[in-house]
Image (spheres, grey):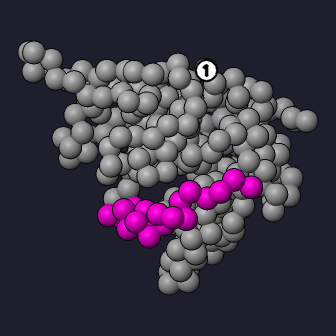
Amino acid sequence: MTDAAYDAIAAWYDNRVREGGAGDWAFPALQELLGDIRSQHICDLGCGEGRVARLLAQRDAYVAGIDLSSELIEAARREEAAHPLGIRYRVDDAESLGTIPDADFDGVVCCLALMDIPRLDATLHAVSRVLKPGGWFAFLITHPCFAAPHARLRTEPDGAASWEIRGYFAEGFWRSDDSGNLCARVGAQHRMLSTYLNALVSSGFSITHVVEPQPTGPVSERNTAYTVVPLLLLVRCTKVDAVV
């Protein structure tokens, strides 16, 4: 089992999410993509302190939240105890999901967590294994084409904003040099878009929808980059093949 980097920053991360975590503005697009999930058994993979798990449960799904960080799972359980929604939380490794039996879920959601997991192929095979035949997998990630390591916003001589991409082909673990950034604290796995797509195919998934959400209002005003390129990518897939 991989070490849980988030254990060391769990309190900071929990507070940050409660103040409005990264990607919150994309959750409406995620919920629209999922459609009617009433009575479905859903796994929130990489659930952290449970913000997405709670959104799913509030839409009448049966939810299990799974994360490698025992500290974040404890935070999620405290919130569940204070405001019960029937969510079951457990510590497990996304690369194996060893506590989950085969074909246990109708769907799996993974929000801004795949970039934290070192072994993508193992994770997608584990997701495929715990899904029922025809089950679905939806995930939100930083956009691999535009949120590449060390990409940055530039202001052109005419005042227009542009986005400079550097290091796209350099796959692997990296850390941001922005001290206030989550990626500076725990790092992330950068992968090319083709790596994600090929891994999905190899794990028996068929892509059904792709969304590049763009924020408006205060979010785009705080970060001009969002007006130039999509920095998040939302994908929904269906399990179509049994993977051995």
User: Going by the picture, which residue comes out furthest to the right?
Assistant: 244
Q: Report the residue marked by disc 1.
A: 194
Residue at point 32% right, 43% down?
Answer: 178
Per the image, is 57 magenta? no
Query: Residue 217 location, x and y as percent?
Result: 21, 43
Q: Which residues are magenta?
A: 1-19
Is residue 48 placed above or below 188 in the rendered structure? below
Q: Amino acid at mark 1?
A: Ser
Look at the image and tell me whether residue 34 can be seen: no
Asked which secondary structure carries label 1, the reply is helix
- Measuring from the top left, give residue 172's x and y in whole percent: 58, 32
Check the image and name the residue furthest to the bottom: 82
Residue 90 is left or right of residue 149, and the answer is right
Q: Quadrant of residue 160?
A: top left
Rendered location of residue 96, percent (x, y):
78, 50
119 with respect to 144 (left or right): right
Pick whichever, 29 or 70, lies toward us. Answer: 70
Which of the pair 2/207 is nearer the observer?
2
For the point 26% across and 28% down, the residue is 153
Q: Nearer the viewer, residue 47 or 86?
A: 47
> Which residue is more in the foreground, 103 or 17?
17
